Image (cartoon, coloured by chain):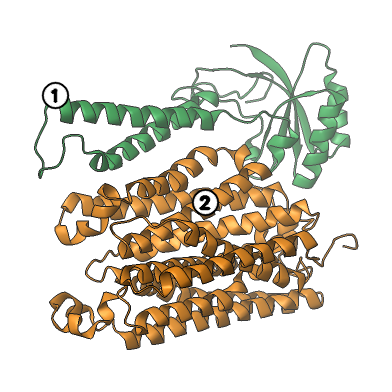
Chain colours: A green, B orange
Amino acid sequence: MAKKKFVVGCFDNEDVLFPAVKKVRTTGYKIKDVYTPFPVHGLDHALGMRETSLHTAGFIYGITGTTTALSCISWIFTKDWPLDIGGKPHFALPAWIPIMFELTVLFAAVGMVLTFCYLCQLAPFVKKHHFHLRATDDLFVMVIECTENTNTEDLKAFLTNNGAIETDVQIAEEGWWIGRYDKDEVLFEGATA
Amino acid sequence: MASIRQSFEIPGKMKTWSFALMGIGIVALIAGFVTKGMSKDHHEQDIFLGTLMYNTIFWTLVCNASMFFLCVTTMAWGGWQQSFRRIPEAISTMVPIFGGITLVVLLYVAFSGSHIYHWTDTVAVANDPILKGKSGFLNIKFFTIWTVLAIVLWSFLGWRMRKLSEQADEAAMDGETGAKFILSNTVRAATFLVWFGLTVGSTVPWLWMMSIDAHWYSTMYSWYNFASTFVAGMSLVALWVIYLKNKGYLEYTNQEHLHDIGKFMFAFSVFWTYLWFSQYMLIWYSNQPEETIYFKHRVQGPYKGIFFLNLIINFICPLLILMKRSAKRNYTLVTFMAVLIIFGHWIDYYQQIMGSISKEHVTMGWLDFGILSLFVGMMIFGVSKALASKPLIPKYHPFLKESIVHHT
């Protein structure tokens, strides 16, 4: 629950955003994230983000699902309660494959959604700070993390020079933040409601 | 634009290889004809004809699949394939040649009174209520007309697509001519796809291959064969793309395009397995003798090894190896998988046809690999010639820029 200071620059064009991201990074500022109204191809690469491990997690969940289905169903049909179904062998693998497949998909899907929510810190009653509401509409919002040495005025000017149409400084909760939109009206400290 | 290499020169080594492969193939063909084809034993004759059949059908459908790929991406208004579209085009020029050979082989099988197509035996059909019931579809007249029509129209409609593509080499297009060009591309692609659906998607595998087991039927069969040849066709495209990249051609094609081709290889391997399994499980589950007869000697008989090898090569390997993003962007790994997948689906065709012709013995041997080498040699020779005859990049294609900036 640590609050941090951020400098926010808003861009209205992808073509301006990419060179700006590059400049900001080479200058040595730490970009927390860029919020965009739609997925921008190559932006993750430009930001130097490491590849997500979500798909590795998905693979592990899937394998867990397959194993669960196979061990469960094979124990039931061969040890616990063997049934004669149309003269088929008790260990009837072809018939189980659809169930194994379904459990694989179920585990992978549910597991990945929950993991995704965890990584993005999304959960019921967890509040997310919006750096700029138009990030969901038409603005590319670049958020730069400040240290105690950062001169915010310089940084704001730097962003403006690189094509930002709007800049400001915000103090926001970065981590998990239990709060409610209807109770906490103020989006960030120092904002006027 | 100035620096791109537009004309492909066939390397001497490639020519030598294709001639060597064709030479081996012709020797094998002649040796096979002498030892098996002219044999008094019907069984040996059938093995010789069957080997020719599955190779010709396989390679015709694989080459035709690359035209299917072009038409489908055209219908989807895809832009990413433009930078390497001359490769599937060149591969599809083999359809008339391989199709012609297929036609000769199939008509010979149908008219020579060979035992492969049981339904050509008029006496047997007259005494068999099942074959009698199917005789509206399974008769020599329909077989001949439909086979000729299928091969001629694949060749013709594919030729129309390739012909139109030449316009993209001639002159820059403004908005209006570009839109017109795209529209006629779409119309021609749609025509091809309709005919493709009526043939490869349904009737042709029934007629050419499923009818060897004249009593048996499966409605999955054509889809299964479509998936099989399509995934092998995409692998073939991948191999040629990688080859040309290695030689320094195709400057606009990069890992992003390879990634998408790899996705096709991965996705359709899984799709093939889905159909494989659906066909197998429904028959296994209902357990009716007239249906299980097809799988009896494949799963429990001499073809057991090949049958499960088929599943390992075509499902387990692509699933585990091609799943990762980095694998689909790795030229070496995609080359390896493409060769493996083409080989795997060749095995698949082997077991589908030879498993029905020679039920007691697995006949895989020198003749199979010899004929395979004949077709690979012809394919390398023909495709490289077709590639050399046209600019490699359709530089005035309206969607070319989409392909250059393509990003997965």
> Residue at coordinates 35% horizontally, 81% vertically from top-left?
B110
Residue B85 seen by the camera: no
Does B216 sit above or below residue B284?
A: below
Task: Tell which tag, 2 or 1, sits nearer the viewer.
Answer: 2
Asked if residue B86 lies left or right of residue B327, the reply is right
Badge 1 local density, few (<14 within 10 Å), some, or many (20+)? few
Asked if residue B211 lies left or right of residue B325, the reply is left
Residue A101: x percent and y percent? Answer: 34, 39
Label 1, secondary structure: give it: helix
Instruction: Say what amino acid the circle numbered 1 marks.
Output: Asp
In this rendering, do the residues under marks 2 and 1 share a single chain? Answer: no
Q: Quadrant of residue A161?
A: top right
Query: Quick one: B369 or A73, which is closer to the camera?
Result: B369
Instruction: Say what amino acid the circle numbered 2 marks.
Output: Ile
Quadrant, the C terminus of chain A: top right
> Residue at coordinates 52% horizontally, 29% vertically from top-left?
A56
Does B304 sit above or below residue A107?
A: below
- Number of marks present in the image shown: 2
Residue holding disc 1: A80
Label 2, secondary structure: give it: helix
Looking at the image, which residue sits at the far right?
B2
Residue B65: x percent and y percent? Answer: 53, 66
Residue A142 seen by the camera: yes
Mark-to-mark CA distance, 2 and 1:
41 Å
Residue holding disc 2: B341
